[in-house]
Image (cartoon, rainbow, N blue to C red):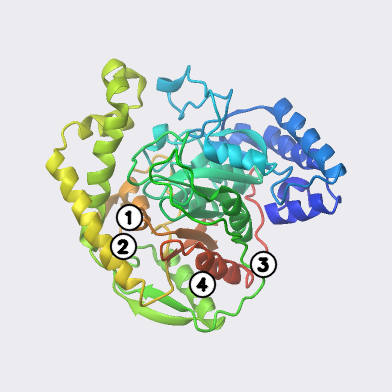
Amino acid sequence: MQPYELSLAAAADAIRDRQLSPVELVDSVLTRIEQVEPLLGAYVAFDAEQARRAAREAEAEVAQGRHRGPLHGVPMGLKDLIDVAGWATTASSQVRADHRAQADSTVAARLTAAGAVLLGKTHTHEFAYGLTTPQTRNAWDRGRVAGGSSGGSAVAVAAGTATFALGTDTGGSIRVPAALNGVVGLKPTYGLVPRHGVTSLSWALDHVGPITRTVEDAALVLTALAGHDARDPASLHTSALDYRPGQDTDLTGLRVGVPRTYYFDHVDAEVAAAVRRAIGQLAALGAQLVEIDIPMTRYVQPILWGLLVPEATAYHERTLRAAPELYQADVRILLEAGELMSAVDHVRAQRARTMMREQWARLLETVDVIAAPAVPMTAAASDQETVTWSEGTVESVSDALVRLSAPANIVGVPALSVPVGHDTAGLPIGMQLLGRPLGERALLRVGHAYEQTRPARALAPVA
């Protein structure tokens, strides 16, 4: 096994025990970038010399006994919405072609303090306003979408061109590409991870979180990221926690909610079957399965768009009017549509979200976690615009991709996407675990327990 193939946890153990140096690990990943990045387009930019310099510094610290923790010397990619001092933050857009960050975002600063080594910035769907990341190709099939908007981060992790990465999630933008590329994606509780220095899509819905190869890896990154920051008005006052799940796989007494409604409606048969098999495995580990009904499902997309669209337009108001031609057509149309939405519609969406949060809170008193598909299908072809379900219903690819992930953003609960196999075409399938606010430890415990029942996952076979 080459160093670039190691999970974060395995690499961290090897670095701590001085069986692997940060320089060896970073060099291995940079070689992998040279080999496959031209095929995948995961990165907006990367800086090999800066990464090697940081790796040498990390190696010197380890040699001196100044080991900072499990992220020390581990190479990462950051979605190109996340400010790093001296780096461009382009949001994969010509609008930001000349932008250069003056200071680190909170999450970048925390990861640097933990010793992580920045490789580069990963592609996003322009300003995170989309579900496909068209600049980037799926790690398992280059003729298919990467998912979005954190497609570059998910593809980098899946292909071995980053040991871990950060994404952002406004309607599913961490979990969707994670599921479509066979990696782990965690959207934390709203406000748990600060967003200062991160380009916004929707203030009411934005989250920052990790994309990793394993659930344990996600826990290690979350431990470094979580915690209050007064510069983010939505940041929660929470105590520092160690989110590592431990080795116990006994789920006896845990109640897993299995939706009767919504999450298994209009879902590909292979996806549904794989997720139900994974849920059955949770039962085999001792969990109690409880059938549940998801509240207010007919309002999910109206609430999502009622919040997101006007807030995105408000953020872009000045540049949209000054230079609309610099935006990609799909994003410009959405931003212009936001100018047509009324304040009444926005207020109604906020009110409906409050009601939905209350009903989800009552639902989550009856179960500990909810298990469901992360997305209703595997990765669509790059030129595919619609999907037709078995009963003849036609849905746009974007609507299909966001449909099952959006509820967690609306109500602010944590959600974890875990790979549960592949379809007959060899494309990855993801199961989504949703929990109570600040219930990340429970989600990570369940996801890790499931993961231990399966053989170790290989990287995507990029060729």
Which label lies toward us, 3 or 2?
Answer: 3
Q: Disc 1 to disc 2, how far (Cα)?
A: 10 Å
**Residue denoted by label 3:** 455
Q: Secondary structure at mark 3?
A: loop
Question: Looking at the rendering, in which quadrant would you find the C terminus?
Answer: top right
Q: Disc 4 to disc 1, how far (Cα)?
A: 21 Å
At 58% from the left and 59% from the top, the residue drawn is 241
Whether residue 50 is situated above or below residue 247 in the rendered picture: above
Residue type pointed to by label 3: Pro
User: Label for residue 278?
Assistant: 4
Residue type pointed to by label 4: Ala
At 53% from the left and 23% from the top, the residue drawn is 102
Among numbered discs 2 and 4, the one appearing first in the sequence:
2
Q: Disc 3 to disc 4, how far (Cα)?
A: 13 Å
Q: Secondary structure at mark 1?
A: helix
Instruction: Look at the image and tell me whether residue 115 can be seen.
Output: yes
Dividing the picture into quadrants, the one containing residue 328 is top left
Which label lies toward us, 2 or 4?
Answer: 4
Disc 2 and disc 4 in contact, CB within 8 angstroms:
no
**Residue denoted by label 2:** 266
Residue type pointed to by label 2: His
- Name the residue nearer the viewer: 128 or 378: 128
- Does residue 395 appear left or right of residue 144 in this picture? left
Among numbered discs 3 and 2, the one appearing first in the sequence:
2
Label 3 packing within 10 angstroms: few (<14), some (14-19), many (20+): few
Disc 1 and disc 2 in contact, CB within 8 angstroms:
yes
Among numbered discs 3 and 4, the one appearing first in the sequence:
4
Residue 441 position, x and y percent, is 53, 65
